[in-house]
């Protein structure tokens, strides 16, 4: 904890924020149900405590100094955080929220079908999901954890492996039939994810044709890539868990060989520098039981 002398009273901070936003002590007093004298005393006490001039008084209006402007911006963030914490506590007094960044396809096909079981086991936890396609700095967000695809290359986090991935080359029925040789795929229009442009090269290397990196039509998400393949736009390399129903129903068919191990795996990651809150501990324990995985220390 910081020394208490650096922690001003909340009413004084609210007075400063209101004056900066409204421009007069009278308007701030009306909003906060105080007298103008109480607002003035709060501001004077705040300046005395900090030892910095925050307010310039010009005629009937109050103007913040440059130091006051900088300070009130941080004060407003802190007040909003306190208000949000209170709202969250009031809405869920026995638990809390888990803010989880997910990959859209994985979230829809793997996580979403399982979340009902987590909700049954932990009704006190509210799970909030938001899409993030690439690693980010946890310090600059409200996320407690994230779903990561790839290797253990996200600095400052710990890992729980959720599943390895296999990919399979598929196309719409009748587009090209079964190709006898892997290199025959180069005569077909290829579809690929913009975040995985090396997948076709690795697939060809697995089938004995290394050193190739064929171009292809780019998609930013698997959902649109899969639809492109279904509608005959080209051959796609797709994780098998995403297209089980499409394969079962014959909307997509394998065009050469079976599933191939992909380069990456799916992980639950969380920042090592922050003590895990109760909702994250509950979710982590639950998903560990779901996948039978082990916690893995990450990079520093």
Image (cartoon, helix red, strand yellow):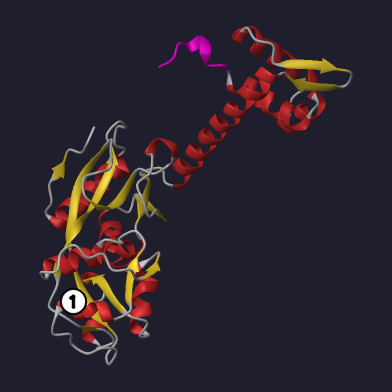
- Specify the quadrant that holds the C terminus: top left
Q: Which residue corresponds to the image point at 79% horizontal and 23% vertical from the top-left? A: 25
Q: Is residue 180 magenta?
A: no
The image quarter containing residue 173 is: bottom left
In x, y percent, where is residue 195? 34, 58
The image quarter containing residue 273 is: top left
Residue range (magenta) = 1-8
Circle 1 sits on which residue? 183
Chief secondary structure of the magenta portion:
loop
Q: Which residue corresponds to the image point at 31% horizontal and 62% vertical from the top-left? A: 197
190 lies above or below 139: below
- Specify the quadrant that holds the N terminus: top left
* Viewer can see residue 30: no
Out of 266 and 236, give the one closest to the viewer. 236
Q: Is residue 5 magenta?
A: yes
Q: Secondary structure at mark 1?
A: helix
Q: Which residue corresponds to the image point at 29% horizontal and 89% vertical from the top-left? A: 175
In x, y percent, where is residue 49? 60, 8
């Amino acid at each position: 904890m910081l020394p208490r002398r650096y922690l001003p009273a909340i009413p004084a901070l609210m007075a400063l924020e209101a004056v900066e936003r409204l421009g007069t002590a009278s308007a701030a007093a009306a909003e906060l149900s105080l007298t103008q004298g109480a607002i003035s005393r709060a501001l004077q006490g705040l300046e005395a405590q900090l030892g910095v001039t925050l307010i310039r008084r010009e005629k009937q209006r109050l103007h913040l100094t440059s130091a006051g402007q900088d300070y009130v911006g941080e004060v407003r963030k802190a007040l909003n955080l306190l208000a949000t914490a209170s709202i969250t506590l009031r809405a869920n007094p026995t638990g809390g929220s888990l803010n989880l960044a997910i990959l859209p396809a994985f979230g829809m096909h793997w996580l979403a079908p399982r979340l009902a079981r987590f909700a049954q086991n932990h009704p006190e936890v509210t799970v909030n999901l938001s899409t993030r396609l690439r690693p980010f700095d946890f310090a600059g967000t409200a996320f407690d954890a994230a779903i990561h695809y790839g290797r253990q290359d996200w600095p400052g986090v710990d890992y729980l492996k959720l599943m390895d991935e296999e990919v399979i080359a598929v196309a719409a029925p009748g587009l090209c039939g079964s190709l006898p040789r892997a290199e025959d795929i180069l005569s077909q229009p290829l579809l690929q994810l913009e975040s995985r442009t090396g997948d076709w090269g690795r697939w060809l290397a697995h089938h004995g044709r290394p050193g190739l990196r064929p171009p292809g039509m780019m998609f930013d998400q698997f959902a649109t890539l899969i639809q492109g393949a279904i509608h005959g736009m080209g051959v796609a390399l797709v994780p098998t868990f995403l297209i089980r129903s499409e394969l079962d129903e014959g909307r997509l068919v394998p065009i050469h060989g079976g599933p191939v191990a992909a380069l990456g795996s799916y992980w639950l990651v969380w920042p090592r520098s922050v003590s895990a809150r109760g909702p994250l501990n509950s979710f982590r324990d639950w998903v560990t039981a779901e996948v039978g995985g082990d916690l893995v220390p990450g990079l520093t």
